[in-house]
Image (spheres, grey):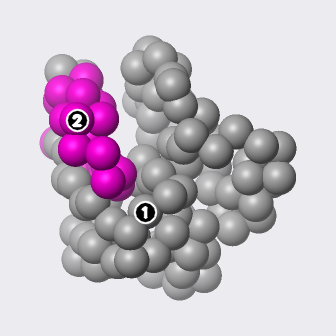
Amino acid sequence: MAKRILVVDDEAELVKAIQIRLQQADYEVLVACDGQEALEKAKKEKPDLIILDLMLPKMDGYKACGLLKSDRRYHKIPIIMLTARAQESDEKLGYECGAEAFITKPFQHEVVLAKVKELLKD
């Protein structure tokens, strides 16, 4: 059974590129384009992992991550923050709200895929 990954970003082309790479690696991919939709999809679909942008419409990635991590039903879902925000303070805040990994854009798909595999213990 394929592991399910929720990809959350408001840049449609980026989402498509990540989706294609993950599907080539035999993952099932769910998509959300804002923080509120991410939260709703995560709760409804219970993905095995979430790739989450920080700067999102409706609710930022920090808040979405924090809300999921503070709920015992979803707190074990690993979250990779994938963002253009590269300040050390952004990364620190990402880990403080519960993310397991922090990758800055631009990124190499191989790095994201390796982190996905590591967190899913594939």
Q: Which residues are magenta?
A: 1-23
The residue nearer to you, when weighing 120 against 89, is: 89
Q: Is residue 76 above or below residue 58?
A: above
Q: Residue at x 70, y 39 (%)?
A: 86
Q: Residue at x 30, y 35 (%)?
A: 14
What is the crowding at mark 2: few (fewer than 14 residues within 10 Å), some, or many (at least 20)?
Answer: few
Q: Is residue 104 left or right of residue 22?
A: right
Residue 69 visible in the snapshot: no
Amino acid identity at mark 2: Glu
- Badge 2 is on which residue? 13
Q: Is residue 54 above or below residue 115?
A: below
Q: Is residue 61 above or below residue 13?
A: below
- Residue 15 inside the magenta-drawn segment: yes
Residue 121, position in %: x, y? 48, 35
The residue nearer to you, when weighing 58 against 80, is: 58
Q: Quadrant of the C terminus?
A: top left
Q: Residue at x 69, y 68 (%)?
A: 97
Report which quarter residue 84 is drawn in: top right
Amino acid identity at mark 1: Leu
The residue nearer to you, when weighing 41 against 78, is: 41
The residue nearer to you, when weighing 17 against 121, is: 17
Q: Quadrant of the N terminus?
A: top left
What is the crowding at mark 1: few (fewer than 14 residues within 10 Å), some, or many (at least 20)?
Answer: many
Q: Give the Cα distance between marks 1 and 2.
A: 15 Å
Residue 40, position in %: x, y? 29, 78
- Badge 1 is on which residue? 56
Report which quarter residue 29 is drawn in: top left
Q: Secondary structure at mark 2?
A: helix
Q: Is residue 35 left or right of residue 78?
A: left
Q: Earlier in the sequence, mark 1 or mark 2?
A: 2
Residue 58, position in %: x, y? 39, 77
